[in-house]
Image (spheres, rainbow, N blue to C red):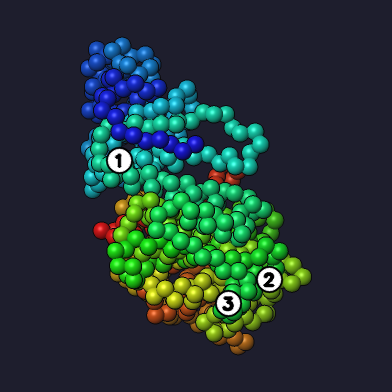
Amino acid sequence: MTLTVAFSSHSPVESQVDIVVVGVYDHGVLSPSAQLLDNASGGALSRLAARGDLSGKQGAITRLFDLPGVTAPRIMVVGLGEAGGLDVPRYLKALAEAAKSLKAGNQVNVASFLGEVSVRDRDSEWCLRQQVVVFSHHAYRFVSTRGRKPGDHGIKSLQLPAGSESALRAGLAIAGGVALTRELGNLPPNICTPQYLAETAQRLATTLPKFSVEILEREEMEKLGMGALLGVARGSRNAPRLIIMKYSGAENADAAPYVLVGKGITFDTGGISIKPGAGMDEMKFDMCGGGSVFGALHAVAELGLSINVIGVVPAVENMPDGDAYRPGDVLTSMSGQTIEVLNTDAEGRLILCDAISYAKRFNPHTMVDIATLTGACVVALGKHAHGLMSHDDALANELLQAGEHVHDRAWRLPIWDDYQTQLDTGYADMANIGGKNAGAITAGCFLARFANEVRWAHLDIAGTAWDEGRKGGATGRPVQLLVQWLLDRAA
Ligand code: BES
Ligand code: MN
Ligand code: ZN
């Protein structure tokens, strides 16, 4: 299922693969590789284009077979739209269409020449890297819990024309991180428990360089006074874990680390404020923020970045039970601040606030938390942009830019103090919900009270972490954004 990617010096004409993928623009304008195939086959492509049988329309896919003078038995021609106007979204769409279409048909070994096109404001290294990421993305299939594994179709190896080794390595590392995040997200909640996540972290430590893991159990969290996290954990028989993953890549071992904190609710029933039944199964994805921390750290370690990065994942299940926490309860967080629980379904902020307080002991250079935190964020931004909140404009811009670069985009929402009063209550320092208005923002404001002096940002990925429906599944977002941001910091 993992895709092998390698450079090959073969031209599209003599490439010895099952299928060769080339691009063609609107109005029959051939890409350089398509032109080579056209020359070798005595003008087969241009003849088809001239009579309208070879579409260059954005996303159109045409298959050609047994072209004379061409070694590979199959050619896939991918429409790239108007020549000269290829921008990032269009390029990525073309790659995705090609990769998806390759799942059907009788081919295992693929040579793609889609990296030769020029994409506005991006260099050839970027094009190469994204090819690896996109093709790998579509080579992934969830099989872990399927008794009858789906048929063994799909591509196994990808050949690319010689290019930058480092871009290839980066593409593979990022693709691996994305795949790990997706797999953890897709696993069912009876398997992917807090303990399973902890064991996964420990497994990573045995294979990744400069990587170490520490796991805190309930007793240690009690000693630390993590009353908010432990309040949520009370309702579940699956005991909580606080997972700490350290990647020490900086030359100076003491260099202040970048800290990623990811919400790891392995299942969110809502607790006593129980959710409606329809679609509740999707709340297995409520650990995707934590999953993205696993994926980002995996990629960073494989890339060998010379920075220190620490991942902190509070892993907890939110269940209703005779011992569950309830609306009206007042919890004392590790920071000492008290919280009145007005809705047990606003649990993410409760586990994150203690994880953020804990993470301060590492004296972070910067802290970013990632969480499937609010349905309100989905209402505000839909399924395309992560919600980004920060008091630090420079940090917000770093993250926005990183997301823009790899098309894993975030959009900023304000967390002005004006919103803070929505969390007022007469029974504690704050309530855990802020009323019906601006739900994504009041959740961010809640977390800001715990991050306070730290250089911190919050990513609400409730809309972006997974695609809905039976054919949906974890997207692996925002691993690309996070890794790009860290690559930029390490540069
Ligand atoms: N995990 C959910 C947020 C969520 C909902 C993510 C739907 C993706 C899709 C979170 O724990 C939650 O339940 N939030 C509540 C907060 C509310 C009670 C203030 C919500 O958004 O309804
Ligand atoms: Mn919830
Ligand atoms: Zn939740």
x then y, percent, for residue 28:
27, 25
Q: Residues within 10 Å of mark 1 (few under 14, many from 20)?
A: many
x then y, percent, for residue 302:
38, 51
Q: Residue at x 67, y 62 (%)?
A: 238
In front of the other: 159 or 444: 159
Q: Quadrant of the C terminus?
A: bottom left
Discs 1, 3 touching: Cβ within 8 Å = no
Q: Secondary structure at mark 1?
A: helix
Look at mark 3 in the image and give the residue it sits on.
226
Quadrant hosting residue 324: bottom right
In front of the other: 294 or 141: 294
Q: Secondary structure at mark 3?
A: loop
In front of the other: 107 or 157: 157
Look at mark 1 in the image and give the residue it sits on.
128
Does 363 appear above or below 466?
A: below
x then y, percent, for residue 252:
30, 67
Look at mark 2 in the image and give the residue it sits on.
234
Q: Label 1, label 3: how many angstroms apart (C-alpha)?
A: 45 Å
Discs 1, 2 touching: Cβ within 8 Å = no
Q: Residue at x 66, y 65 (%)?
A: 239
- The amino acid on which the numbered mark 2 sits, given as a three-letter code, is Arg
